[in-house]
Image (spheres, helix red, strand yellow):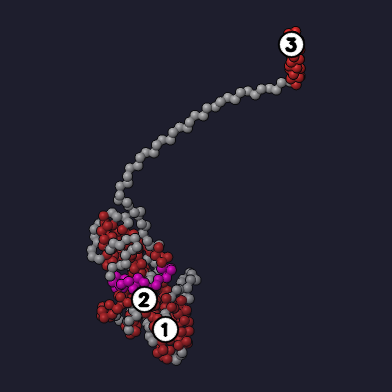
Amino acid sequence: MPPPPDADDFRTDDELARAHQRGDAAAFPVLVRRHEVRLRAYVCGDPAWAGGGQLLVGHIWTAADRNIREGKLRGPFRGWLFKVAQAVARQHAGGTPTPRAERLATGFGKLRRAKPKWHRLVMWVSHGLNRTAVAKRHHITKAGLKERYTRAVSAVKELPPAGTGDPLRLHLAGVPFDSARLPAWVERHLAGDHLGELIEELLALRPPPAELNFDSWFAPLKDHILSGGLAKVPRKALRQLLADPRALRHLQTAVLVGGGRYWDAVPRSKGFLRRLSGTRPAAPPPVDSRTPAPRRPAPRPLPPEPVLLTKAPPARKPLPAGVVVAAVAVTAVVSVVLVVVILLTTSRGE
C-alpha cells in the first residue's frame, strides 16, 4: 500500500525519486518525511544500535541520496530503502555486546542465582503467560504477583554500572498485567525506537531454547498483522514470539516494510519524535526552474534643486531721541511759516 500523500506533494515515492535524480531539490525532503519514522524504528530495533542510531540513520539517508542520483534505485522505494539500510548497518556493525547488554546479563544472572523463583516469575510474565496460572503456581493473588514482579525487576534495574550510579531503564518493568493490553504494548515497541533494548532484556533474561521458525509462524497471520496489528493474534502465538526475541526483529522488519497505514498510526512517544528530529538530513533549498524576468535598472535619483539664498538687508539703527525732537520742531515751524504766508497773500489780494 502506498504511503499517504503529503499535503504539499501528491507524487508517489518512485516519481519523487526520479524527480530527485533529475535535480529536483524539493523531492528528497518529501521522501525523508514519509519514511523517517519507520527507518528510525528499524535501525533502533537492532540490539547493536539499541538506544541510539542517530549516526547510522544519517549514513543511510546519505547512501540513499547518492544511489538515487546514480540511478541505482531498483523496485519499490520503501523495500529498496530498507535494503540500503541493511547494507549500511552491516558496514557499521560493531560485533561486540553493548555496555547495556553486559549490565543486563550481570543483573539477571545475579537474580537467577540469588532468587530463582523471582527470576522464573519475571520470565513467565514477560513471555505473556497467563497471569492467573502464574499466581496459582506461586500460591499468591494477582495483586501479590504484580508486587513481587515489580520487586524482582527493581532488583535488576537498580544495579549500577561500574564507576557510575545510574540505574538501568528496563522496558520489562512496563509489561501490562492485563493480557488484553499485551498486543498494544508489543506494537508500540515494534513501531518505536526501543525494540532493540527490549530484545536485549529478553535475551539476558533467558536465551531462547530453540529458534522459532518465523516464516511458518508468520504465514497464517500475515494479512491480519500487516493491516490490523496484533489484536487478532492468538495468545499462544504471541507467547511463542516473546519467547524468542530474535523473532521480534523479523516481525518488525515485516511490518515496517509491508505494513499498512495502521502501523503509521501506532502511538509514539514525544521522546521518539524529539530524537527523530536529530536524524533528519539537512534539506537543500528548493530550486525554481522558472527564469526570472530581467529587471530594469532603477533610475538614478535627480540631484536636489539648488536653493537660492537671498541676503537680508541690514537692519537700520534707531535715530537718537534729540534728532527726532529737532526734526519735529523744524516741521512745526515750517508749517506755521507756510500758514502765515498763505494768510498774507490772501489779505493783499482783497
Label 3 neighbour load within 10 Å: few <14, some 14-19, many 20+: few
Q: Is residue 73 left or right of residue 336?
A: left
Q: On the image, numbered disc 2 is attached to which residue?
A: 187
Q: On the image, numbered disc 3 is attached to which residue?
A: 346
Q: Position of residue 226 (x, y in %)?
A: 30, 75
- Residue 3 found in image quarter: bottom left
Q: Position of residue 202 (x, y in %)?
A: 38, 78
Q: Which badge, 2 or 3, is on the more N-terminal residue?
A: 2
Residue range corresponding to the magenta coloring: 253-272
Residue 62 drawn in magenta: no
- Residue 73 found in image quarter: bottom left
Secondary structure type for disc 1: loop
Q: On the image, numbered disc 1 is attached to which residue?
A: 178
Q: Is residue 242 above or below residue 292?
A: below
Q: Amino acid at mark 1?
A: Asp
Secondary structure type for disc 2: helix
Label 2 neighbour load within 10 Å: few <14, some 14-19, many 20+: some
Q: Which badge, 3 or 1, is on the more N-terminal residue?
A: 1
Q: Which badge, 1 or 2, is on the more N-terminal residue?
A: 1
